[in-house]
Image (tube, grey):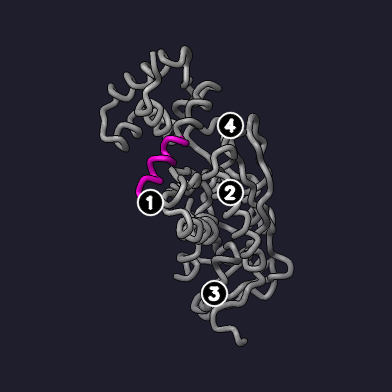
Amino acid sequence: MDTKPNDLLVLLTVSRSAKFTTAAQTLGLNHTTISRRIAALEKALGGRVLSRASGGWELTDLGQEAVRVAEQIEGAVHSLGDPRRGPDPITGVVRMTATDGFSAYVAAPAVAKLRRQHPGLSVEIVTVTRQALQQRSGLDIEVVVGEPQVHRAEAFKLGDYELGMYASRDYLAEHGAPATEDELTEHRLVYFVDSMLQVDDLDAPRRLVPTMKDGLSSTNVFVHVEATRASAGIGFLPCFMADLHNDLVRLFPDTLSERLPYWMVLRPDSMRRPAVAAVVQALRDQTVARGEVLLGRGARPGDAG
């Protein structure tokens, strides 16, 4: 039985979401049709292209080979709009996860710049703060805090960022500025929900100031920043986010700080896709370009010069 290009493109869509239902919505088909197309493809190829995993469907070795062919078909289709150009290999959907701050201030501008050169590229960014997954169905790139312990994956360090204690000027005017680190225990902390924190490297405030009580907690770092600006307490914040706001003052910068690494995790086969390789390089370049800012050394708004 001959392999149909449409069936290959269905497999490509399933591989990007790891779910039949999501692929069906993307293609305007129903779940049964997706299942039937995959079954027909497996019959034509003489083997399984997908296997069940905890997060959805994973490509088998045969499935990975089929997807590479499907990507070539997709690229050829995209090139039809301009006969003067060959197919742009940097096209299709790349799905990644990263922390809130990295997603907004590193990934978003990196992807925006890349898409100006490759308009056929689409990047989906899911914001989470967690350890790297052991099963990453439908996921091309993970950016996590701290060195990951993963199997069947490639991992490398992107760069470092720094966190520090910040308070709003209004808060300090109302409550007084702590003169010593011990006086921080008289104030409330704005930070992650301790019981829901999934990254051990982010426990610094509980280690640096263990007797400081929580005031406002959230799983979202943008809430930390805005709550600190609203005088909910003293926040332990990424410097590259806090330093954007002139109404925030950093406390004890020489002694109360934590430098943490961003790591990138990839499936072993991910870099074979030109689109994924391009996004990876864009993220690396943007992390390097923002290196001083990530470490809290960038100029703040309103600084002279």
Q: Amino acid at mark 4?
A: Gln
Residue 60 percent location from the top left of the image: 52, 22
- Residue neighbourhood size for the residue with mark 3, other residues' Cα within 10 Å, grouped as few (<14), some (14–19), many (≥20): many
Image point 65% across, 34% down: which residue? 150
Q: Nearer the viewer, mark 4 or mark 1?
A: 1
> Which of disc 3 and disc 1 is earlier in sequence?
1
Segment tinted magenta in the rendering: 71-83
Can residue 13 be seen here? The reply is yes
Q: Residue tagged by mark 3?
A: 248
Judge by depth and name the residue closer to the eye, 161 or 266.
266
Gap in Å between the C-alphas at discs 3 and 2? 33 Å
> Which of disc 2 and disc 4 is earlier in sequence?
4
Gap in Å between the C-alphas at discs 1 and 3? 51 Å
Badge 1 element:
loop
Labelled disc at residue 134:
4
Decide whether residue 80 is among the magenta residues.
Answer: yes
Gap in Å between the C-alphas at discs 4 and 2? 20 Å
Residue 195 percent location from the top left of the image: 53, 44
Q: Residue tagged by mark 2?
A: 280
> Which of disc 1 and disc 4 is earlier in sequence?
1
Gap in Å between the C-alphas at discs 4 and 1? 41 Å
Image point 32% across, 19% down: which residue? 36
Q: Amino acid at mark 2?
A: Val
Image point 63% across, 64% down: which residue? 289
Badge 3 element:
strand
- Mark 3 and mark 4 residues within 8 Å of each other at the beta carbon: no
Q: Nearer the viewer, mark 4 or mark 2?
A: 2
- Residue neighbourhood size for the residue with mark 1, other residues' Cα within 10 Å, grouped as few (<14), some (14–19), many (≥20): few
Which residue is the extreme one toward the bottom? 304
